[in-house]
Amino acid sequence: MSNNELRNGIDRVGLSGLVAAAYLMRSRRFYLRAATLLAAMMVLGGWMLPCRASTTPDENSPQKRLKDLSLEDLGKVDVVTYSKTPAELLNTPAAIYVITSDDIQRSGATSIADALRLAPGVEVARLSSTTWAVSIRGLQSNFSKSVLVLIDGRSVYTPLFAGVYWDVQDMPLEDIDRIEVIRGPGGTIWGPNAANGVINILTRSSRDTHGVEGSALAGNQDHTIDDLQYGAAARGLNFRVFGRGFERAHEYHTDGNNEDAWHQERVGVRADYAAGADTFFAEGDAYRGNSPHVVGTSNVYDETSGGDINVRWQRDLNKTNGFYVQAYIDRTLRTNTNGLGETRNTIDVDFIHHLKVPGRQEFTYGGGLRWSPYQIISPIPGENLTPPSATDHVYTGFLQDEVHLSGKFSLTGGAKFTHNNFSGFDIQPSARLLWSPTDHQSVWIGVTRAVTTPSDLEENFLLQGGAGGTVVQVLGNKQFMSEAVVGYELGYRLLHGSRFYVDVSSFWSQYMHLQSFSAATVSTSGGTTYITIQYENQIAGHTTGFEFAPQVTIASWWRANLNYSYVSGNFAANGATSDISATGSVNTYEKSTPRHIVFLQSKMDLPWLFQFNQTYRYVSDLPAQKVNAYQTMDLVLARPLGRDFFFKVVGQNVFQAHHNEWGTGDPSQPVVGINRGMYVQVSFKGGGKTP
């Protein structure tokens, strides 16, 4: 087995993975059916609902709704990701940024991963048509292992490789209310795998989606994305159901191996009910599709499917007293013909109780249980986990106390306690101090310890191959430890009137026990020579940097968001290591994160109801991935058509025919170029009133 074959074996495992049963959509004819149905509903809706000629958009139209949040509103908006209870953004002692629905719709993004580029400190690189590398403040990799990603509080993390499959995180983007991004360790409340940050995707309540909504998109890269949903209320219960399908073209391959064109179909439902102080929420979806990609010189054809049910009961007596219980079930399946596949069931229960106690204190405590039985599917001899089936579990508990001190100060301290089947017991403490000298500015400082628990891959992996009496093997390590970080942060926020808002934060993060590979060892048994490489925790180091994110209302018709992020890393190994993969070496930790990212989003409301939006970004080079610095821009021209329709023309990556964003670290695999794209989209909303 050659060094490149070892690289391909290691990297293939991380790119192969998930699924579970969605039997509602059986063929690509779904797209034709969905598009035809959508067109029929749009025509029918336009005929049944009276059109109103007006120069002012309707209250419930996309243009009006997406313009509602002013900069002053943004500073005062309640966020929930920091403490799992509502807290005003301006007075939150953490580096938290809100990507609004307006930001997403005006950016022209067609996937959740691409929408995350809108937040400062978030590094997003597209590997191929189906795969992204997403991280926060460094340690960028195609596994996203140090970032906890949630959808309405449901974790989409997989313990197979301690990461996220971005290709199956999909929904109608119009249903996203906002995305809250915490930059830096989020260990106290959220626990393991939030070492570098938390991304919480929050969807709109079904109370806000009555009537028929739909959209149809056609383009050269996104061939088609079709959404159709219906929402209503019955006896106080609000609900919506939706269907979504897309088909996407391959990206630019210098070797002509254009194997990453793909498709996916999804259906889902959400329901909301309120009774006095109690609110109830339930949602679920099911999907089916494929996710092909190239690893080295091999084509990997993943078949993906899955489904989940997520429910929550919340009782709020007031803003500081209440509790909630949330539970979800997730079943996933991913199979392919050239790498590890997996079937996994995850059951999770989470409880939070927050209350006001004497002495100007707000006390929060809670706990959670997660069980995740899995079965590995391996079509290749010599590549598997040992054992191939088991049950992963994590048990958590936490305490947090916020004390309002004299004057404008508040102190928050707490700790998360976890036990998992990989590394046993761990504790993650945090302390944060907030100073609010005025009602429109705040300064905060924090220190947090957070961990990333080992994965099934790091503990149980087995890869063997060879010839002529020699066997090369890569093995998991039963003694693999949790990767740990201690993060120190300092931040400042200022809201100046209704025209200027700025968020500045700096950080220094010390990492310990990062994943690496041992140097090769040679042994002989029964006349066979074994060359063994094992997962290790031999790398440590630190990152430093800052983010600067002003938002400006230039005029009543023009608003701009600017983000600048800087990250520098310094890592070293405490023993001999082997660079056999795109991860796990000093070089990849130091040089796989862009040192500079510049992002500018300009949003203009022009005469005759036109919107013109420009999104520019510059990303510096990634030497470990053999990717040069690049800059590009997306352009969006949009306009409502009558009362219920909205038309959009989008150009993506318009500066060049294609550009590179990420590599594999494998010189045998050409870097995939991300193509220039263009699409047109028509969306429709009508037939319902928001109560």
Image (cartoon, rainbow, N blue to C red):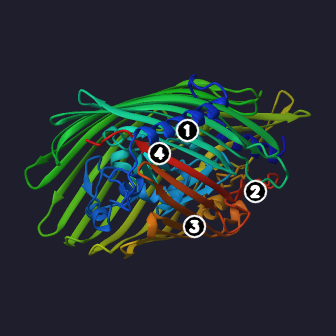
- How much space separates mark 4 and mark 3, taking CA atoms? 51 Å
Kindly check if marks 4 and 3 are in contact, taking CB atoms under 8 A apart as contact: no
Q: Residue furthest left?
A: 358
Question: What residue would you read off at disc 3?
Answer: 570
Question: What residue would you read off at disc 4?
Answer: 684
- How much space separates mark 2 and mark 1, taking CA atoms? 39 Å
* Mark number, residue 163: none
Task: For the C terminus, give its image quadrant.
Answer: top left
Q: Secondary structure at mark 4?
A: strand
Q: Secondary structure at mark 3?
A: strand
Kindly check if marks 2 and 4 are in contact, taking CB atoms under 8 A apart as contact: no
| Image spot of residue 621 (x, y percent) | 66, 68
Residue 415 visible? The answer is yes
| Image spot of residue 65 (x, y percent) | 36, 54
Q: Secondary structure at mark 2?
A: loop
Who is closer to the viewer here, 242 or 198?
242
Q: Residues within 10 Å of mark 4 (few under 14, many from 20)?
A: many
Q: Secondary structure at mark 1?
A: helix
Nearer the N terminus, badge 4 or badge 3?
3
Question: What residue would you read off at disc 2?
Answer: 671
Task: For the N terminus, give its image quadrant.
Answer: top right
Who is closer to the viewer here, 474 or 276?
276
Residue type, mark 1 in image:
Ala
- How much space separates mark 4 and mark 1, taking CA atoms? 10 Å
Who is closer to the viewer here, 122 or 196?
122
Q: Is residue 328 left or right of residue 22?
A: left
Residue type, mark 3 in image:
Asn
Nearer the N terminus, badge 1 or badge 3?
1
Residue type, mark 4 in image:
Phe
Q: Residues within 10 Å of mark 3 (few under 14, many from 20)?
A: some
